[in-house]
Image (cartoon, rainbow, N blue to C red):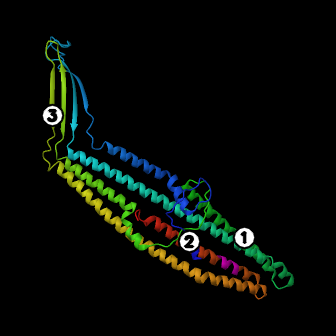
């Protein structure tokens, strides 16, 4: 039974076909390729990278065109260039933020790219987890239905002996209706399993885009390497997002500190006057004076520093939460594995032995049909219980592996 779990490594993904049965690895690959949310995060990365190109560039220059000193009162009112003051002016102005501010803006843009990358990785992991769990649910839902189909055949086999036993007087008349009652109850349970399959298939469609997904092959190996999982926690997207937020906060601190350095503005213009007067050229420089930093820049710097401290503490808290969650999930996985082992080695063999003994006793006339039917149902219940425990182990293995497995070897 343990070989039921045998499977090549989950990460050796084959390119999924357009249609047809999906192995577990192919379902993950299809989800990677089809999920709109992953494509949306990719577009977000492209937007961040494109925005970073202009992050540390100078602002666009400004063109100034104006009519200067035009009289609108007095003897020359409304007359253009009739005196020596009126002129047309054309000028350019260029703002020059200080170099520290430009470097800080570039660092902030780089941090924004890191955030986009980390969020894309987190979304990809979320999609893979959901696709993997949907595949597991569909696989085991179909296996449960197969057990009920086998039970239906067992009940039919036993029911076929009822008329002969009634004719011989070795069975009570009431026993003849027992198979029909049990088959009606079995039909109810079968309807539940069919609905369970439809729900799991709908979820798998949600994540893979396949309108009629079919599972193929066995589930992945549920065995886990706890030490390796713990060692890879630092590379998980959840913590990479926190690291990127720290980078953003650090860039904001640098940007606030850069505000203490003066910005520049350079301007030049040419003024055209009455021809009998010469043209004029103007050149000017403006410099910010970041005075009174104690009331202006320093409080902003302190606020950004506090935000960076908060980001660092949030990262520490997130790492502790991941460690605790992993330890808890591994404990549940061990418990489910132990329950599966007990059912496989003890409970199912006992139920199978009892069913065989009761079947032999029924054939020998020592028990009635009702007891033989109940024994067959008990065997099916034991098989379903084993499958449910096996599903718990498989779900744990897939969820833990896809959630906590690091992105780097």
Q: Position of residue 149 (x, y in %)?
A: 70, 70
Neighbours of disc 3 within 10 Å: few (<14), some (14-19), many (20+): few
Q: Secondary structure at mark 3?
A: strand
Front one among 185 and 66? 66
Q: Identify residue for label 2.
A: 6
In the visual, does 313 lie left or right of 83? right
Magenta segment main secondary structure: helix
Q: Which residues are magenta?
A: 375-380
Q: Distance of mark 2 from mark 3, alpha carbons?
A: 75 Å
Q: Earlier in the sequence, mark 3 or mark 1?
A: 1
Q: Distance of mark 1 from mark 2, alpha carbons?
A: 37 Å
Name the residue located 31 percent from the left edge and 42 percent from the top edge.
54
Name the residue located 59 percent from the left edge and 55 percent from the top edge.
17
Q: Identify residue for label 3.
A: 285
In the visual, does 389 lie left or right of 370? left
Name the residue located 15 percent from the left edge and 49 percent from the top edge.
295
Q: In which quadrant of the rendered view does residue 278 lie? A: top left
Q: Is residue 81 above or below residue 339?
A: above
Q: Position of residue 95 (x, y in %)?
A: 22, 36
Neighbours of disc 1 within 10 Å: few (<14), some (14-19), many (20+): few
Q: Earlier in the sequence, mark 2 or mark 3?
A: 2
């Amino acid at each position: 039974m343990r070989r039921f779990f045998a499977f090549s490594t989950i990460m050796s993904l084959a390119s999924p076909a357009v249609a047809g049965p999906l192995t577990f690895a192919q379902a993950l690959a299809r989800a990677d390729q089809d999920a709109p949310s992953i494509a949306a995060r990719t577009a977000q990365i492209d937007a961040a990278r494109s925005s970073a190109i202009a992050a540390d560039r100078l602002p666009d220059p400004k063109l100034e065109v104006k009519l200067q000193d035009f009289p609108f009162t007095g003897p020359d009112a409304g007359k253009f260039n009739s005196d020596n003051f009126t002129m047309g002016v054309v000028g350019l102005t260029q703002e020059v933020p200080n170099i520290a501010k430009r470097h800080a803006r570039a660092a902030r843009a780089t941090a924004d790219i890191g955030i986009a990358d980390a969020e894309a990785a987190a979304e990809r992991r979320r999609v893979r987890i959901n696709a993997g769990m949907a595949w597991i649910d569909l696989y085991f839902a179909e296996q449960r239905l197969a057990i009920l189909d086998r039970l239906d055949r067992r009940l039919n086999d036993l029911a076929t002996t009822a008329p002969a036993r009634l004719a011989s007087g070795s069975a009570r008349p009431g026993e003849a209706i027992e198979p029909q009652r049990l088959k009606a109850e079995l039909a109810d349970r079968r309807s539940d399993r069919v609905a369970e399959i439809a729900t799991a298939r709908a979820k798998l469609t949600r994540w893979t885009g396949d309108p009629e997904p079919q599972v193929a092959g066995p589930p992945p190996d549920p065995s886990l390497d706890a030490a390796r999982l713990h060692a890879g926690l630092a590379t998980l997207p959840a913590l990479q997002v926190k690291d990127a937020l720290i980078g953003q906060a650090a860039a904001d601190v640098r940007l606030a500190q850069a505000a203490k350095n003066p910005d520049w503005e350079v301007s030049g213009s040419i003024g055209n006057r009455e021809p009998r007067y010469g043209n004029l050229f103007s050149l000017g420089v403006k410099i910010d004076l970041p005075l009174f930093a104690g009331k202006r820049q320093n409080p902003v710097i302190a606020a950004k520093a506090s935000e960076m401290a908060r980001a660092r503490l949030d990262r520490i808290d997130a790492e502790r939460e991941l460690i605790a969650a992993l330890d808890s999930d591994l404990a549940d996985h061990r418990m489910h594995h132990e329950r599966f082992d007990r059912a496989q080695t003890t409970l199912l063999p006992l139920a199978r032995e009892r069913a065989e003994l009761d079947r032999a006793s029924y054939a020998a006339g020592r028990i009635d049909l009702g007891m033989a039917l109940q024994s067959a149902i008990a065997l099916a219940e034991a098989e379903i219980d084993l499958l449910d425990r096996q599903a718990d182990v498989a779900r744990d293995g897939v969820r833990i592996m896809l959630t906590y497995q690091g992105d780097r070897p």
